[in-house]
Amino acid sequence: MRKSFQYNIPQARQYRLIDLFSGAGGLTLGFTKAFGQSLLPVWANDFNDYAVKTYNANFGNHCVVGDILDIVENRINDIPKADIVIGGPPCQGFSLLNKNRQDDPRKQLWRPYLDIVAHSGAEIFVMENVPQLLGSQEYGEILAAAEYLGFKTVSAKLCAADYGVPQTRHRAFIIGCKFADPKLFFPPKKSHRKPVNSNGDAPFVDILEEYVADSQPWLTVRDAIGDLPAPVGTEIRDESAPLDLHFGRTPTPLSVKRYKAVHKEGMNRFDLQRIAPHLTPACWIRKTEGGTDLFGRLWWGRPAFTIRTEFFKPEKGRYLHPAQHRPITHREAARLQSFPDSFKFAGTKIEVAKQIGNAVPPGLAACVADCVAAMLAHRETKNDGRIYEPKKKTDNVAYQRAEYVA
C-alpha cells in the first residue's frame, strides 16, 4: 500500500479543491489519495458528458458539463471558493501529433483556467499538459499571467514511471503558489528507478539527490497486468471488476496473421515488413522512417509506452499484449495508467477508452499532490509557531500496485 506522509496539517483543516478539464478525474484521484480526509473536492468541469458521469460516480455530484468559456463568461459566480485548483487544459493544441497546432485555439484555454483560479481565491494551482507546452510561446504568457495574479511558479517535466506508474508517459506540470516559493517543494523526488539495461534486472544508476531513500525498480507491464486471464467477449460486461472492462475485439483474419508475425516482445511494424512483407500495408512500406512503435508488442519486463485514447488499435502504437496475439484491453490500459480496479467508468467502450487515455495517471498525480501538501504544511506550521524546514525536493512515494488491484 502507498505510504502517506504526515505534514502536520491540523486535522480540523480541510482544503477545498476544484478540477478543471477534469476528464475522468485522474488528477482528483491522485490528490484525494495523497490528502485523505484533508481534501474536499467541491467543483469540477468537463465538456464531455460521459467523463462528467464518471467523475461524479467516483467523487460526488459536483462536476458540471459545459464549455468552460461559456461558464467563465456567463456563470462564473456558480463556481465556489477553493484553496487549490488543478487541471489540464486540452493538450491537443500543443501535441506533436496535431499538424495544425500552431493556430489551434485550444492552446489558449489556459486563460479561462486562470480566470477561475482568480475567481475561486485559490492560493495554489497545478496545471498539467504535454511537455511541448514548456517550449511554447504560451508558456511564457502563462507564467506572466500567474505572476500578475500574485503567484510564484515552478515547472518540470515528469516521467510517470519514475513515480510508480507502469508507463513511460511524460507530462509537464506548472505549479503556482501565493504564500511560498514552490521551487523548494517541487519537483518530487523519484520513487522508482530506471534499470541500467533493458531486461529489468541490472543494478540501478544511483543519483541519490534525485530519489527517495527506499526507491524501487520501475514497475513493469507484468506487475500491472500479469495476473489477468485471457479476455472474454467484445463488450463491457455486467461483471465485477476487473473483468467488467477486460474484453477483446474481433480482429480480421489478416490482422491475426499480422499479430502472429510480430510474435516476440518489442517487435514492431518494421519487423512485420521484414518477416512478412506480404502482410504489411503499402503505406507502411512507403514510410521508411519514424513510427517505430506502430504495431509494436509490449515487453513484460518494462513499463508500457504512453497509453493514448485508441490503445485498442495496434496500428496506433505499441499496444499488442506481450504474449497473446491481441491488443491490450480496457482493463489492462486502465491498470497501466494506474487506475484502481475499483474506479468506476461510465459510457460506451469508445468513451471509456477516451477517458482512460486522456487521464493524468493517478499515481503520478499523487506525487505532485504530496508536494502541494508539503507547501500547505509549511504554511500551517509557520502559523502555529513550529518550525518546518522543507527539503529542496520533497520526499514522496508513489502508489504501489497493490492499491490499484481489487
Image: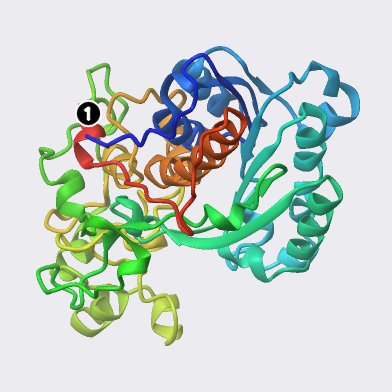
On the image, the x and y values in percent for residue 110 come to 75, 48
Whether residue 153 is visible here, answered yes or no, is yes
Which image quadrant for residue 276?
bottom left
| Left or right of residue 43, residue 337 in this image | left
Whether residue 20 is visible here, answered yes or no, is no
Q: Secondary structure at mark 1?
A: loop
Q: Relative to 351, say whether 299 is above or below.
A: below
In the displayed orientation, state which residue is furthest to the bottom.
288
Q: Residue at x 37, y 66 (%)?
A: 210
Around disc 1, counting alpha carbons within 10 Å, would you say few (fewer than 14), some (14 to 19), or many (20 or more)?
Answer: some
On the image, the x and y values in percent for residue 120 come to 76, 27
Q: Relative to 174, say whether 245 is above or below.
A: above
| Left or right of residue 95, residue 148 in this image | right
Q: Residue at x 81, y 46 (%)?
A: 150
Circle 1 residue: 242
Which image quadrant for residue 362?
top left
In the displayed orientation, state which residue is furthest to the right.
73
Q: Nearer the viewer, residue 368 or 21?
A: 368
Q: Is the C terminus in the top left, top right, bottom left or bottom right quadrant? A: top left
Q: Nearer the viewer, residue 364 or 373?
A: 373
Q: Residue at x 32, y 50 (%)?
A: 165
On the image, the x and y values in percent for residue 220 come to 20, 56
Q: Nearer the viewer, residue 152 or 120?
A: 152
Q: Residue at x 49, y 41 (%)?
A: 374
Which image quadrant for residue 113?
top right
On the image, the x and y values in percent for residue 197 come to 18, 78
The amino acid beneath tag 1 is: Pro
Q: How many marks?
A: 1
| Left or right of residue 303, residue 76 in this image | right
